[in-house]
Image (cartoon, rainbow, N blue to C red):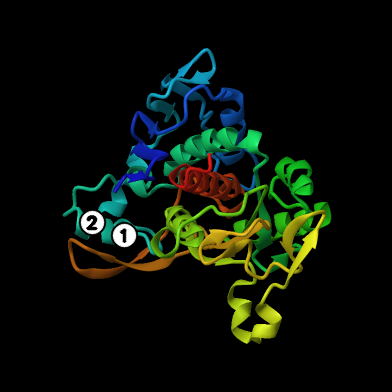
Amino acid sequence: MNSFGQIYRTTIFGASHDLAIGCAVDGCPPGVRILKEEIQKQLDRRRPGGSDLSSPRKEKDRIEVLSGLLDGKTTGGPIAAIVRNKDVQPSAYEAFRNVPRPGHADFTASVKYKGHQDIRGGGTFSGRMTIPIVISGSIASQVMKPNGIRIAAHSLRIGRVWAKSNPPVPNIERIARKNSVACADPTVAKLMKEEILDAKREKDSVGGIIECIMTGLPVGVGEPFFDSVEGVLSHLLFSIPAVKGIEFGAGFQVAEMRGSENNDAFDIRNGKIITRTNNAGGILGGISNGMPVILRVAVKPTPSIGKSQRSINLKEKKVTDLEIAGRHDPCIVPRAVPVVESAVAMGILDLMLVGGIL
């Protein structure tokens, strides 16, 4: 399916080497001021070619809004927007029609679509398909901003290099959004950059962990069971290419805790009900409890690497070696940070509209 959301519903279209990639967003409340420059800022954080740590593919990724905005405000109709693909090299991918790249969707797509899949740049499986997620998520963030909801993500880990978990959101906005690895600690950022460059020099790649923190979310967002906050956000976050795992709050550490350690004791601060710890990550029973929502996603190393890898020739049914030349990221983590923020915004706005909270 190419659509997500019950009320705030986003449909994505296009592919890596099509004329354009875009989305149509239904259900956005009318009369909300949407700044295109804010959407562009998010797209600029995601776009390739910004540094020696990303793919050399040169794309400006300029947003074009086709409908749904008038005089800078939402009309209540569908918001359609596109980004045109400019720097395409389709011939570079023809060899992968019969020889699938390890770690990519070439093989599974070939079987599912009976050989008719678009192989250019990965087609609909390309990381460029996160562009419409960023567009929709940026719109959602602007809708929720007047309500005091802030969403900020950062690179918690790249390869073997860790930063501190749960930094203040202002630090993320002030520091992480200004450096090439999206790290909230300038000292650790230098180590992360060197970790990526080491992999690049070895014709390899490296993965990492992105942590996302949301503040200002009121109590009561989310539904039990199938539309829980965790369920909806996990659905969206696993739609991001390269995401292989997710945890909320203390996450997998709860497996080694006692109940007395894991349970977040309640307290009252300035007349507001809070919890003294936040192992639940701001969610109880699938519903927000008013504490910051904290989640982490694991991002795999970019599968396109310069090292020789074992593959198969689907046509000849023979084992062969494959070396991938071309324009690829040695680490996709920094560019995926705004995508994670955007996916979270999409899911939360939809849940708020479904619950009648917004």
Percent x, y of residue 267 = 77, 66
- The image quadrant that residue 232 belongs to is bottom left
Would residue 166 be seen by someone viewing this image from the given angle?
no
User: Residue drawn 39% across and 62% down?
Assistant: 226
Q: Nearer the viewer, residue 255 or 221?
A: 221
Q: Which residue is mark 2?
A: 110
Left-right relation of 137 to 7: right
Mark 2 element type? helix
Residue 172 at least partly seen: yes
Kindly report the distance in space between the C-alpha atoms of the residues bearing marks 2 and 1.
9 Å
Q: List x then y, in percent, for residue 257.
A: 65, 84
Q: Nearer the viewer, mark 2 or mark 1?
A: 2
Say what secondary structure mark 1 lies in: loop
Are discs 2 and 1 less than 8 Å apart at CB?
yes
Q: Which residue is mark 1?
A: 100
Give the number of the disc on residue 193. none
Q: Residue at 51% of width from left, 47% of height from top?
A: 343
Q: Nearer the viewer, residue 13 or 205?
A: 13
Q: Residue furthest top?
A: 71
